[in-house]
Image (tube, rainbow, N blue to C red):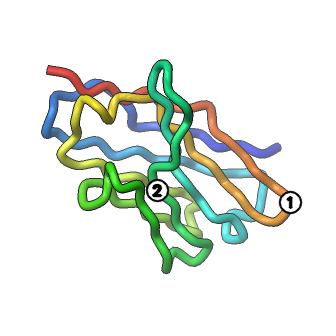
C-alpha cells in the first residue's frame, strides 16, 4: 500500500521557519522524483520544489527560491522542505508528491498558515 504522510505544518508568524517532512512507503522511493506542491484557497495547486531521485538536482518556484530548501534521505525514505522567512502568501496546504515512470502518488497534505 502506497503512503505519503506529511507532517510539520502549523501556524507561524511572518519571518519564522517551519520544516515539513514526508515519509514514504509502499513503493521504491529511490526511483521517484519527489516534489512539494501547495494549494492556497481559491488558487490552483502549484509546484514549490522538486528534487531528483539521487538528490543532485533541485528546482524551486521563483516565489520561494532562496527561502525554501528541499532535501531527501533515500535510506529513510523521507523528503523534507525547510521553509525560512515565511510570508503570509506562503499560507497553503502543502502536498508531497512522488513521480516516476508509470506512477504519480500524493499525500494528504499539511496546512501551513503564516499570519501575524
The earlier-in-sequence mark between 1 and 2 is 2
Label count reads 2
56 in relation to 92, above or below? below
Closest to the observer, 38 or 111: 38
Residue ID at (22%, 49%): 84
Quarter occupied by residue 101: bottom right
Quarter occupied by residue 13: top left
Q: CA distance from mark 1 to mark 2?
A: 21 Å
Q: Say the numbered circle drawn on residue 23.
A: none
Residue 68: image location, x then y, percent: 31, 55
The residue at which mark 1 appears reads as 102
52 in relation to 50, above or below? below
Residue 62: image location, x then y, percent: 35, 56
**33 displayed left or right of 60:** right
**102 displayed left or right of 110:** right
Residue 16: image location, x then y, percent: 16, 39
54 in relation to 61, above or below? below
Find numbered disc 1 in the image and state the secondary structure of the residue it sits on.
loop
Q: Quadrant of the N terminus?
A: top right
The residue at which mark 2 appears reads as 49
Q: Quadrant of the C terminus?
A: top left
Mark 1, residues whose alpha carbon is within 10 Å: few (<14), some, or many (≥20)? few
Mark 2, residues whose alpha carbon is within 10 Å: few (<14), some, or many (≥20)? many
**60 displayed left or right of 34:** left
Find numbered disc 2 in the image and state the secondary structure of the residue it sits on.
strand
Quarter occupied by residue 88: top left
Residue ID at (46%, 47%): 21
Residue ID at (50%, 27%): 43
Residue ID at (71%, 43%): 3
Q: Quick check: marks 1 and 2 in contact, CB under 8 Å?
A: no
**66 displayed left or right of 34:** left
Amino acid at each position: 500500500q502506497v503512503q505519503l504522510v506529511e507532517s510539520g505544518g502549523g501556524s507561524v508568524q511572518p519571518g519564522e521557519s517551519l520544516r515539513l517532512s514526508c515519509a514514504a512507503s509502499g513503493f521504491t522511493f529511490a526511483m521517484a522524483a519527489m516534489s512539494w506542491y501547495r494549494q492556497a484557497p481559491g488558487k490552483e495547486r502549484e509546484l514549490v520544489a522538486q528534487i531528483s531521485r539521487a538528490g543532485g538536482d533541485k528546482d524551486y518556484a521563483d516565489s520561494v527560491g532562496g527561502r525554501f530548501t528541499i532535501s531527501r534521505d533515500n535510506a529513510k525514505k523521507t523528503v523534507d522542505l525547510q521553509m525560512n522567512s515565511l510570508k503570509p502568501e506562503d499560507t497553503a496546504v502543502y502536498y508531497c508528491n512522488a513521480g516516476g515512470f508509470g506512477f504519480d502518488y500524493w499525500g494528504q497534505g499539511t496546512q501551513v498558515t503564516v499570519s501575524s
